[in-house]
Amino acid sequence: MEGYFLPPISFTVLEAVCLLIGTDFIEQRFDDDYRVRAQSARGKIEDILPENVRNESSHVLKAMRLLISDKHVTPSKEKEYLEKIRRAILNERKISFHYTKKLQIPRKILKRY
C-alpha cells in the first residue's frame, strides 16, 4: 500500500476544523488531481473522528463556510495553469509565461524616517 499509516491519533474539534478547512481550500483552488485527493483525505479524517467531534466540527465548519465563498473559486483556466506549474515544479522543469497586470497601479515611493 502506497502512502502512510498513522497510528491511532486524536484531534480536538479545532484541529479537525483546521484540517477540514484546508481540504475545502484545496478542493476549490487546486487542480483536479489535488481536488480528488483532498476529497479522499476529508473522508478519511471525517471517518476517524468520534461522533461528538465530527458533529461539533461540522457545526463550526458550517459557520465558517462564509469565509470561503463561491466567488473565490478558482476559474477552470487558472486551475489548468496551476496544474501545469505544479507538474513543472515536481518534474524540475523550466516554465515560461507572459504576465500582464489587469490594473495599472501607480508605484509609491516610501521614505524612511
Image (cartoon, rainbow, N blue to C red):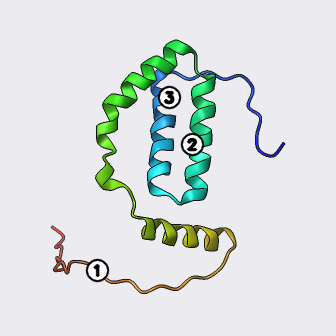
Label 1 Cα crowd, 10 Å radius (few <14 / some 14-19 / many 20+): few
The residue beneath circle 2 is 39
Asked if 69 appears above or below 31 in the picture, the reply is: above
Asked if 41 appears above or below 87 in the picture, the reply is: above
Residue 71 percent coordinates (x, y):
29, 54
Dot 2: what SS?
A: helix
Q: Residue at x 18, y 77 (%)?
A: 105
Q: Residue at x 37, y 55 (%)?
A: 73
Give the CA separation, mark 3 to mark 1: 38 Å
Looking at the picture, which amino acid does disc 2 mark?
A: Gln
Quarter of the rendering occupied by the N terminus:
top right
Q: Nearer the viewer, residue 43 or 96?
A: 43
Q: Residue reaching furthest right? A: 1
Q: Work out whether mark 3 precedes mark 1 in sequence or the reverse, and give the earlier one.
A: 3
Give the CA separation, mark 1 to mark 2: 33 Å
The residue beneath circle 3 is 15
Q: Work out whether mark 1 precedes mark 2 in sequence or the reverse, and give the earlier one.
A: 2
Which dot marks residue 101?
1
Quarter of the rendering occupied by the C terminus:
bottom left
Residue 11 percent coordinates (x, y):
56, 23
Label 2 Cα crowd, 10 Å radius (few <14 / some 14-19 / many 20+): some
Looking at the picture, which amino acid does disc 1 mark?
A: Lys
Front tag of 1 and 2:
2
Label pair 3/1, CB-CB below 8 angstroms: no
Residue 13 percent coordinates (x, y):
47, 22
Give the CA separation, mark 2 to mark 3: 17 Å
